[in-house]
Image (spheres, coloured by chain):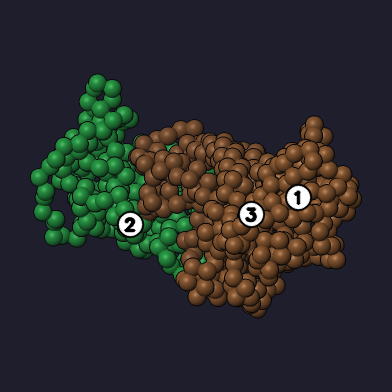
Chain colours: A green, B brown
Amino acid sequence: MTETRSVTSSAETPTDRAAVRTDEVWKVFLQGPEEVQAVRGVTLVIERGEFVAMAGPSGSGKTTLLNLIGGLTRPTRGHVWVAGHDVAGMSARALAHMRLQQVGFVFQAYNLLPVLTAFENAELPLLMLGVEEGERRKRVHELFERTGLTGLEDRRPGKLSGGQQQRVAIIRAVASRPALVLADEPTANLDSATSASLLEMMEELNRETHTTFVFATHDPQVMERARRLIRLVDGQIDSDDS
Amino acid sequence: MERGRLMLRLAFRNLRRQARRSLLTAAAMVIGGGLLIFSVSLGDGTHEDWIESGVRMGSGHIAIQAPEYAVSRKIEDRLSTQSVAAAREGLRSPDIAESVLQVVPRLTTGGLASSPMGARPVEVVGVDPVAEAGFSTLDERVVEGRYLEPDDRLAAYVGAELAEGLELRIGSRMVLTAQDAEGEISGQLVRVVGIFGTGIPEIDQRIVHIPLQTAGTWLRAEGAVTTVAVLLDRSRAVKRTAHHLEDVLAAPIAAGDLAVLTWQEAMPELDAIVKVDDLGNYMFQGITFGIIALAIVNTILMSVLYRHREFGVLQALGFTPRQTGTLVMAEGVVLTVLSGLLGIGLGLFVTWFFWRDGLDISFTWQEDWTFSGVVLDPVIVPLFRAARVIQGLLFILFVGTLASLYPAYRATRIDVAEAMKFER
């Protein structure tokens, strides 16, 4: 799929301190000769500390919107601000730094590095941030203890269950204390009990650290627990219920 | 620092993850590295042998002559007694003395050798028999008779082809005729005491050794020489020794009394042959390592394509494209350096093995091989040089880095969002 881009007029950076703000953001891909409008003029504000789910059928644009917010892809038109930074205008290097400092990702397929142990996977963003070793170990060990993974630190991902891998992925996402955690179908590969426990854990983190969580999901459990549910249909916001 | 350690840790573990592929590529590099060191050592040993043979048959590693002599080859362009003394003094300098194995004075002139059977053009070399025997290998090439001795006066040591042409035997008399130092044509009767055969036609047909004192008297140039030939312990010492001599002999050189010539200047044909052979060797190494580089590109590129999603994850977590590329480079360089070091170790072992007795390739020869005044020895002794090992390592590192560039570039160009969708 090829993406199309067009020049947009620069918008003023909002002065508020929202975690995420999008302004008429579009994402258009070229799929062969056809133009696919994955996100169509979405404008939304997510305040700090929110626990938000974006739901919708397949192809509704929720993963693309999540990628736009995380700076993994650039908007064709419009603007995205994360913690006041205009993501659309950033260089690849600046985007990487922004992700490292501000955003944590949790993926459906866990995406742990197979050559690193659970502990090494979890501490990776801290290491990249230059957090000193003692502090790194302390933070990761605390999170391992809290998530019931103590004793599994030296295991490689292949030796962990799906639920355990996703816990490690969540630790990796939150260990650096980012302002925003983006979770794309984090419970899709898990049974309902494991999903419930993981969601509980993320809710706790959200309450205690005021980290903003944004989910793209099909899972009714996630939708139930979310304090705000945004429904997307055909790349547009269909409903936004708090 | 910690990021660097992380990169190396990831590189090592990723190589181990694809152990079979990594080992196959490493094996190519080990063999290539071994071949590189051994063939370079063998080449250096061969060249050292050629140079050793050439300089002993010729005018040494370094020749000190009057500037015009190299072209004119006339006795009037001889060195003055003061120049010879200055040259000998310079060669005794502590900085270079230990590299100097032998110094021989020679009074050389072109002339004619005549017998009742006819005349042949020759190069008559007046030598100090004792010093010359420690310098040249001609004394070891006796076919009949003996080499010159210190008490000899009207004696001559001639090449086999000259002896055959003039029908000379041991004890035969012949007349040498040449222009003397005063420009007069002068003749000298000598008696053949020895006949040599080198297998090199231009030497066997032309060279006649007579005692230096006899040559000086005959050519009315007593005490004078045309060349002070210097033999060093190794050809690598030539440059440094020549530069040192040029420094200490700066005054007579500036006055135009003498010139310091290296063997490369005195024997440009031999120098050219060594360089051409080196070039051939380098081309062979270039082709070998070109093929190895393709294997490295393949291994690392396959790894990049296989781990597309993984690189996407790393960038999502905050790796910059450049850091992602560096990680890939680290894998290529780690693989190359480790296998290259093993290869160099293998090469050094093989070099050491053949260094003891040499590599005998005489079974491939029909007869003696000679060129440009050099007799080739069929037993090649590889020559170890630390500089060659460092050059080899740097070359291997260069190849590894170069081969990793494209895969690294591919890793930097990953579309993160697409990579996250990527399914193996």
Q: Single out the mark in the foreground, 2 or 3.
A: 3
> Please, which residue is most extreme toward the top here?
A33
Say how many tags the image has. 3
Tell me if mark 1 has few (under 14), some (14-19) or many (20+) residues whose alpha carbon lies within 10 angstroms of its own.
some
Residue A16 shows in the view: yes
Per the image, label 2 sits on a secondary structure element best described as helix
Q: Position of residue A12 (x, y in %)?
A: 10, 54
Q: Could you tell me which quadrant the N terminus of chain A lies in?
A: top left
Tell me if mark 2 has few (under 14), some (14-19) or many (20+) residues whose alpha carbon lies within 10 angstroms of its own.
some
Amino acid type of the residue tagged 3 in the rendering: Ile
- Residue at 60% across, 51% down: B267
Report, in whole angstroms, how far the alpha carbon at label 2 lies from the one at label 1: 94 Å
Q: Position of residue A186 (x, y in %)?
A: 42, 43
Residue contact at pointers 2 and 1, CB within 8 angstroms = no
Amino acid type of the residue tagged 1 in the rendering: Val
* Front residue of this view, candidates B166 and B357: B166
> Does label 1 or label 3 sit earlier along the sequence?
1
Residue A97, disc: 2
- Decide: is B195 above or below B165: below
Q: Single out the mark in the foreground, 2 or 1.
A: 1
Label 2 is found on which chain of the structure? Answer: A
Determine if marks 1 and 3 fall on one subunit.
yes
Read off the residue under disc 1: B175
* Front residue of this view, candidates B202 and B296: B202
Read off the residue under disc 3: B185
